[in-house]
Every structure is written in structure tokens, then in C-alpha cells.
Image: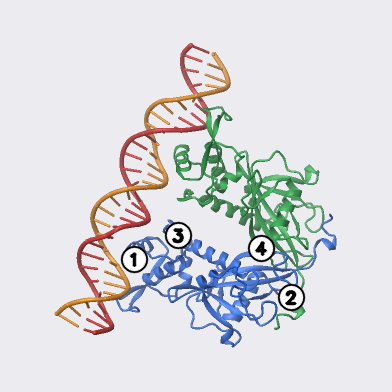
Chain colours: A blue, B green, C orange, D red
Amino acid sequence: MSPYDPSAYPPFAVTVDLVVLTVRRHALCALVVRRGEQPFQGRWALPGGFVRGDEDLAGAAARELSEETGLCAHDPALPGAGNGAHLEQLATYGDPKRDPRMRVVSVAHLVLAPDLPAPRAGGDANSARWAPVDEVLADTGEDSAGLAFDHARILADGVERARSKIEYSSLATAFCPPEFTVGELRRVYEAVWGVSLDPRNFHRKVTGTPGFLVPAGGTTTRQGGRPAQLFRAGGATLLNPPMLRPEV
Amino acid sequence: MSPYDPSAYPPFAVTVDLVVLTVRRHALCALVVRRGEQPFQGRWALPGGFVRGDEDLAGAAARELSEETGLCAHDPALPGAGNGAHLEQLATYGDPKRDPRMRVVSVAHLVLAPDLPAPRAGGDANSARWAPVDEVLADTGEDSAGLAFDHARILADGVERARSKIEYSSLATAFCPPEFTVGELRRVYEAVWGVSLDPRNFHRKVTGTPGFLVPAGGTTTRQGGRPAQLFRAGGATLLNPPMLRPEV
DNA sequence: ATCATAGTCGTCTGCCTGACGATAAACAGC
DNA sequence: GCTGTTTATCGTCAGGCAGACGACTATGAT
């Protein structure tokens, strides 16, 4: 029972897995890559990889993100600005049988990114894609179509985290380009929550919450209606009062 | 760069650390144990230990909890009832230098428990105690008094999680015995948040939130005033609308 | 010119919250 | 027994916010 009995702390492999979410064509999408090796060869999986001996967990996640997408992670702890995506730790998965090869503990991270031109996976465009999360999570339990390992569970947890976190934080702006309109922000909420929101009440709410949005000056016509004011994300990270997710 | 290059996944030790919180004498307290070995010998630290080769993370946390306190963890995923304490995963800490001996990744868990008679640590009552979190976290940065390793940071994260989670969930009842009064529940909120709440508005709020409390039948005089109704925790886990934490 | 689309400003009503008065039921001390 | 203290519980009232929805504005399409 001595805590220094070597048999008491068997070696583990530690990986990071990434739940990279974005909003594309009014749908919440996750980045998935096709596995090239056993096990689960040919199946879709979340991007990820092993943590190296000299890097911390967030660093490993940022490196994997950069390798898979070219995105620059933006650690919310740092005041650094940016076009970088939001990155935060999600949860850790360590079931002894989650990887048939060996004992692997995976520290999942959540990344929220604006809509990107196209995913890249080491130049092989065919092996990475944005998959609508509803489709990916629909066939949970079926062995043929679901994600590899326990990645469906991880993805579901990441989606749930994103859905709840945009309620009380300004994180929805992480899905938007640096300058955006109120309508674009509303479509983010609608896509992530899977609901439709009243444009008038939404506009009143977000423009009335102090620190959420700051006017960027110009106006834009991107959708063919009346031009809309452009905004940037304000300094506030916590929304008070929060956005209310409609029932049902 | 091959993901199967053995040098790319160096072995890690994986531990679980526990942030065990309770409310004692109107103060939020955390369980801390005195370290018997180097490094940080003699310093206070969070309870924890190595994950065994055949157990999952929640199982390791429940085992450590049982060993340190005799508490039976109550996994919120299971419908099992209980006097067991609430246990949930908190976050994972993996800085390469967080343990000077070797590369250790620690999966911290949060435990919320009712006030217990006394902590025990393998029979040595002197090596475990309930420490008010305000005191423990007050001397952050001082090398002599703070917790070992990065445990002050872990504790702060756990406290923050508890503070925010009792806003929108019924988790505050985890700090109460199976049957409790509205006043006792209010004192939990006051201790965790460090504020004082209006008893009348609090009573209206908690008794009016569906599923939060169910009457247990009897009444009790525990504090010397008018007898209070006894309640049990209701089935609801998410409070809608949430409790509002006062400003300041 | 007319229509369709999207954005923005107001109004109204109901609900919730915070502030706080009032009553009820126990105990302590005289 | 009476009074003061403590705690619990019920009510009232005003202000604020959210949902429902009407009205107007500014663009592009036909």
C-alpha cells in the first residue's frame, strides 16, 4: 500500500484529443479525421495525439490543433488577442479498455473556431472533414458508422459544454470572424442550440449586455438585406445576465 | 512524427487528487492531509494517489475517497441513491514540472460531502484535517504555508467549480444530510458563496423551484427558533431558473 | 415600382427578484 | 406566566427583464 511501490503506478500513455467545433452552413460541425492504422482503421475519429515528454497538456493540444488545421490556439488565460481559436480543457477519459492496445488516458480539449475555408490533414484533404455533429452523433451504438474509440462520447460532452457555455459567456463570438454582425452571432446561437431565436429580442439582448459587443464602425451587406452594423467581441467574458436557451 | 514511434509517447504516471469540500461551522472547508514523504514532506496536500492498472479514473477517485474518509462516493451517472457524497471529475493537471520526481499527470476530482464527524487518514487523526478554504488559499505564493505541488491551484479550481455549480444545479443538497431544513440549505449557500442571503426570499425561491426539494414530513428544532420543515433533495438536478449569486 | 430579405426600434404583458413588513413557534431568563 | 430573542414562514410591492409581436428602414432581385 506504500505509494511508492512501483507496481502501484503502472505506466500510462497520455494523449490529447480535440473536439474542434465550428458553424458551417447553419450547422454545428466537428472536425474528424480518418484513421490510417489499426485499430479502427478507416473509421472517423477525433484528431489528437500523444503528449510529448516536455510539453504540458494545453501545449500538446495547441500543437495538435496547429498540425491538423493550421489554427493558432488562443489560450483564454493569456490576454493575447487574436484570430486564434478558443481552446480549453474538456475532460479526461481513462477507461482501462478504451484503447485495446494499451492503457491510454486521453485529456480531451474543446476548440471553438470560426468557419474555415477547408480542413487540412498533412496535405491529405481526403482524410479530414467537417462533419455535422447531429449526423455523427445520430448513429451512436452502430459499429459501422460511429466514431472510433470512445470519441462519440467525447464529442457529445464537448458539444454539451459548448451549448451550455455560450449561455453564460461570450464564447459564441469565438465562432465568428473578428468582425461580425448581430445576425451572424444569432445564427451561431441558433446552430449550436438547434433552435430559432427572435431577431428583435436577440438584438436587444446582445446589444444591451455590457461588454459583450463593441461597435466596429462599418456596416455590411452579406446576406442581401438591409446592411448591418459590424461589431467586435467586447472585453466581457461572463455574461450577466446570461443568454437564455429556450425550452424544448 | 509517426504516432507509433515509442519515443513519442513517453510513460507517464497518472494520479487522482481529491478536492473534498464540506461546510463546517458556517465555513467552506477542504480535506487536507499531511505529507509523510519527500518532496514537500510535512506540508499539507490534497488527498490522492496513483491510478491502478485496472481501474478507471472515477473508480480510483472513489477508492481514494473511501480510504481517506470512509465516504462512499455517489456517481451522479448512476441512479443509485444515497448517503454517498457527490463525486465528479474536475480537471487534469499535467505541467511537466509539477512533480519534481517524474512526469505525473493528475486527474483532479471534486467531492461534495455533508459535515462529517472527523476525518481519518489510516487511523492517524493528526495527519488529516478540515481546513477552511479561505485560510488555505490566503497564503498562496508563500512557500512555508501553502499546499504542496500545484494543489492550491487545484483547490481554487474546485472551489470555483462548486461556487458556480450550486447556482444552476441542486448540488448544494450534497452538503446537507439526507433530511435538512431550508435554513440549513441557506447556510450552505451562504458559506460557499461567502455572502448572506435574505431568508424570506431564499425560502420562497427554493420551495418554489420544482423538483428541488420534497417535503420529508417532520419538523425539527435544531437552532432554538421555530421548528422548521424537513426536506429531502428532489429529483431535479438542474435548477430552472437558477439561484442567483449576489453581486460583490 | 414592387417584392423579398434582413436589420433595428418600440410597446406591452407577465414573471421573477430584491426589499421588507408581519406573523408563528420555539427557547431563555426573570 | 411574561417578555425578549431567535428562527421560520407568509405577504406585499416596485423594478427589471424576457417573450410576443407591430412597425419602420435599407438593401437587392424581378
Q: Are marks 4 and 2 in contact (CB under 8 Å)?
A: no
Residue labelled with disc 4: B92
Mark 4 vs mark 1, CA separation in Å: 40 Å
Q: Are marks 4 and 2 on the same chain?
A: yes
Q: Chain of mark 1?
A: A
Q: Position of residue A18 (x, y in %)?
A: 60, 72
Q: Is residue B191 above or below residue A220?
A: above
Q: Position of residue A15 (x, y in %)?
A: 68, 72
Instruction: Name the element at disc 3.
Output: loop
Residue at 38% across, 63% down: A206
Q: Are marks 1 and 2 in contact (CB under 8 Å)?
A: no
Q: Position of residue A118 (x, y in %)?
A: 51, 83
Q: Is residue B80 left or right of residue A80?
A: right
Picture disc at residue A199 = 1
Residue at 66% across, 70% down: A57
Mark 4 vs mark 2, CA separation in Å: 18 Å
Name which residue type carries label 2.
Tyr
